[in-house]
Amino acid sequence: MNPYVMFTLILGLGLGTSITLTSSHWLLAWMGLEMNTLAIIPLMAQHSHPRAVEATTKYFLTQATAA
């Protein structure tokens, strides 16, 4: 994975976590959790193992249904 993409995903993960932890409104907490989801999905699929891709797909479908 490109180092700039990896840096952006890690930065988004940290930013989403900090937004969630410091939020004073439920909308900000939800926004932080969604940022974490969008950052963690590519990191889960980074390894080209079939189980990693399957787990990423199941996680994404579950999250999309819940959202």
Image (tube, grey):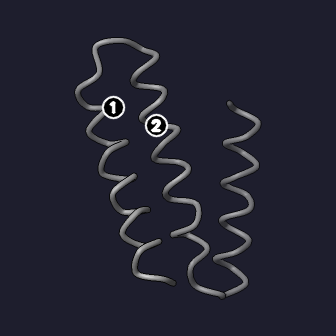
Q: Position of residue 54 (x, y in %)?
A: 74, 71
Left or right of 38: which side holds 14? left
Q: Residue at x 38, y 53 (%)?
A: 13
- Secondary structure found at label 1: helix
| C-alpha distance separating marks 1 and 2 | 6 Å
Q: Which residue has dot 1 on it? A: 20
Say what amino acid the circle numbered 2 marks: Leu
Image quadrant in which you'd find residue 55: bottom right
Residue receiving disc 2: 33
Q: Residues within 10 Å of mark 1 (few under 14, many from 20)?
A: many
Q: In the rendered view, tell whether residue 62 sits above or below residue 51.
A: above
User: Mark 1 near mark 2, Cβ–Cβ under 8 Å?
Assistant: yes
Residue at 70%, 74% (x, y): give it: 53
What secondary structure is found at the residue carrying circle 2? helix
- Residue 27 percent location from the top left of the image: 46, 16
Is 9 rendered above or below residue 47?
A: above
Q: Which mark is residue 5?
A: none
Q: Nearer the viewer, residue 7 or 37?
A: 7
Instruction: State the image coordinates of residue 14 (x, y, percent, origin top left).
Output: 30, 51
- Number of residue marks: 2
